[in-house]
Image (spheres, rainbow, N blue to C red):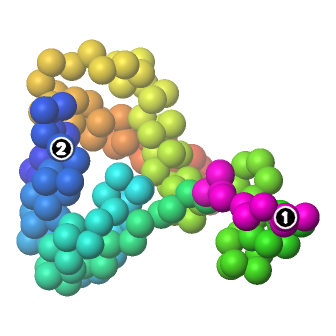
Amino acid sequence: MIPYVTGADLNDRPALDDMVTKLKDKFPSLKKLWADMGYQGRDLKERIGRQGIELEIVRRPNKSFWIPPGIKDVNAHLRSLGIEVVDGFKVLARRWVVERTFAWIGRYRRMSKDYEFLPQTQETMMFLAMTRTMLKRTVKTINQI
């Protein structure tokens, strides 16, 4: 089994290198990973790219901008610079998949907080929670046929 859960003393970026190496061995057809802005950086992207995997960073829209003095229509100025103007909430590409999965896992009492002492136990509980979620959905689909 590939360890996906690590201790809090390990930074996410080196952990990603280890995980990608193990995943590439197990799933050789893996071509693309989506990650949040905590994984951005040319060096990490190049290291992952050497393994034949494209690392795409899902960026959130900027919330603050420097506007030169004298600009009357801020939205038009930002659009002219190629900056998308977003008012309120916007669904980010691929981000909803991660957030939805975390919500599914968090529905299980033992996964609602970090109760586990060992990372291996936490990982096992995640596998159990997701296995149960998938089985419930499979049974529901079969019963509809």
In front: 133, or 126?
126
Q: Residue at x 27, y 16 (%)?
A: 115
Q: Does the magenta portion include 64? A: yes
What secondary structure is found at the residue carrying circle 1?
loop
Badge count: 2
Q: Cα distance, mark 1 to mark 2?
A: 45 Å
Above or below, 99 relative to 86: above
Give the amino acid type for the residue marked by disc 1 in the picture: Gly
x, y percent for residue 81: 69, 78
Give the amino acid type for the residue marked by disc 2 in the picture: Asn
Mark toward the start of the polypeptide (1 vs 2): 2
Q: Residue at x 18, y 43 (%)?
A: 11
> How crowded is the residue under tag 1: few (<14 C-alpha within 10 Å), some, or many (20+)?
few
Q: Which residue is mark 1?
A: 70
Residue 51: name its quadrant.
bottom left
In front: 47, or 106?
47
The magenta stretch spans which residues? 62-72
Above or below, 26 relative to 5: below
Q: Is residue 16 left or right of residue 99?
A: left
Residue 102: name its quadrant.
top left
Q: Is residue 104 left or right of residue 28?
A: right
Q: Does the magenta portion include 118? A: no
Q: Residue at x 13, y 39 (%)?
A: 10
In front: 125, or 19?
19
x, y percent for residue 30: 26, 76
Specify whether residue 26 is in view: no
Q: Which mark is residue 11?
A: 2
Above or below, 96 relative to 68: above
